[in-house]
């Protein structure tokens, strides 16, 4: 029985601790950066694959401000949950963009408001994986 417990502990270390040592701590669920000179309000809604709401937050961002939202625990453990999620971003109650992705410990959805390279669009949404 002790041998099995030791084997389980070693298995957990290999798949939970070693990735953290190699890749570092998990990245945020999403980040938002305001490149505009004015204040903007961004509503962020996150839905799982069954269309159940996981998050509904509104952020007021001043010029140059950046905010991050941490990942819930289930996304911090590699392989614990692999499900597609839909992010819905509504800027100033006028412009809405939808972005779908598979949330994992080391990927982050990045939203930039009025970035120079947004080509006339107020929201630029992308994803970074470490």
Image: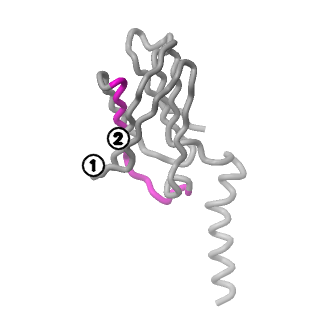
Q: Residue furthest right?
A: 21
- Please state which of residues 57 and 85 is positioned toward the viewer in this rendering: 57
Q: Secondary structure at mark 2?
A: strand
Q: Residue furthest bottom?
A: 1
Q: Which quarter shows the N terminus?
A: bottom right
Which quadrant would residue 40 be assigned to in this image?
top left
Residue depicted at x 48% and y 12%:
117
Q: Given contact means CB atoms under 8 Å apart, are the residues at marks 1 and 2 in contact?
A: yes
Residue depicted at x 50% and y 26%:
61
Residue 63 drawn at (x, y percent): 54, 18
Residue to which mark 2 is pinned: 86
Residue to which mark 1 is pinned: 51
Q: Which region is colored magenta?
A: 77-92
Residue 116 drawn at (x, y percent): 50, 10
Which quadrant would residue 67 be assigned to in this image?
top right
Badge number at residue 66: none
Residue 46 drawn at (x, y percent): 37, 43
Q: Secondary structure at mark 1?
A: loop
Left or right, 125 with respect to 105, comes to left
């Amino acid at each position: 029985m002790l041998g099995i417990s030791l084997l389980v502990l070693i298995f957990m270390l290999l798949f939970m601790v070693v990735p953290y040592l190699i890749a570092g701590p998990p990245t945020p669920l999403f980040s938002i950066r305001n490149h505009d000179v004015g204040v903007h309000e961004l509503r962020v809604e996150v839905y799982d694959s069954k269309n159940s709401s996981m998050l509904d937050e509104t952020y007021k961002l001043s010029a140059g401000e950046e905010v991050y939202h941490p990942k819930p625990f289930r996304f911090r453990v590699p392989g614990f949950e692999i499900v597609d999620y839909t992010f819905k971003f509504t800027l100033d109650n006028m412009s809405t963009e939808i972005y779908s992705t598979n949330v994992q410990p080391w990927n982050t959805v990045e939203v930039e408001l009025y970035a120079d390279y947004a080509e006339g669009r107020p929201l630029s949404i992308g994803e970074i994986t470490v």
